[in-house]
Image (tube, rainbow, N blue to C red):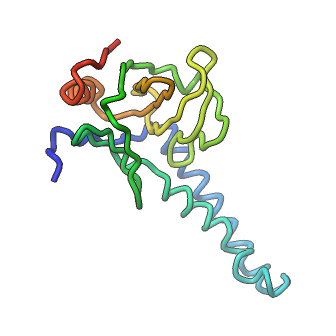
Amino acid sequence: MPKTENLFAAPWDRTLRLVTVLISLVCLTLTAFLWPVIQAHGPASMHFWGGLLPVFIVVAAALFAVRGYRVEKGELVIERLLWNTRFDLSHLQSVQSDPMLMQQARSVLGNSGFFGFMGLFKHPARGPFRAWVTDPGQALVLQFGDLVVAISPEDGSRFVAALQQCNPRVRSQ
């Protein structure tokens, strides 16, 4: 069992909460209106999926949501609903706070505000990076050689201290 001092919440900022609620409401409203129409007038092959597709979109997006971050056994663990994503901290070179990162980045392949900012992004100065961010104002940029990762744990300074405890060579900027 991991120590609680190495567990970090993934707080949602106000914009993320608002966008997620609005998109979810639109999808659920679409289902409420489409389901009876498709059942009455649609082809048989559409009876099930036609009306439930918006609900499927909400559920699928929720599965990718970041629940939290852990630093344990020399790894950064990004917790999702059904799985975890892991990074070996022995390869971590530096960590830097960048609250403007997501404002200046463009999504290449990912999600920009529905249950999080997750996927592959490109920043004009930093280049490509992978993101698991829920509060852009608390974004931390982790440099693993050529791989750049962005996350947003609840307490950045405590998180950096946990990283440096696992790997004392990590530079903090």
- Residue 65: where, in percent of width, then height? 46, 51
User: Between 151 and 62, which is closer to the camera in this rendering?
Assistant: 151
- In this rendering, position of residue 16 left or right of residue 47: left
Q: Quadrant of the C terminus?
A: top left
Q: Is residue 163 visible?
A: yes
- Residue 40: where, in percent of width, then height? 81, 86
- Residue 6: where, in percent of width, then height? 20, 39
- In this rendering, position of residue 17 left or right of residue 57: left
Residue at image position (14%, 45%) is 3
Residue at image position (46%, 37%) is 133
Q: Is residue 64 above or below residue 18?
A: below
Residue at image position (22%, 27%) is 158
Q: Is residue 154 above or below residue 59?
A: above
Q: Is residue 62 above or below residue 93?
A: below
Residue at image position (49%, 27%) is 148
Q: Is residue 141 visible?
A: no
Quadrant of residue 165 within the rendered picture: top left
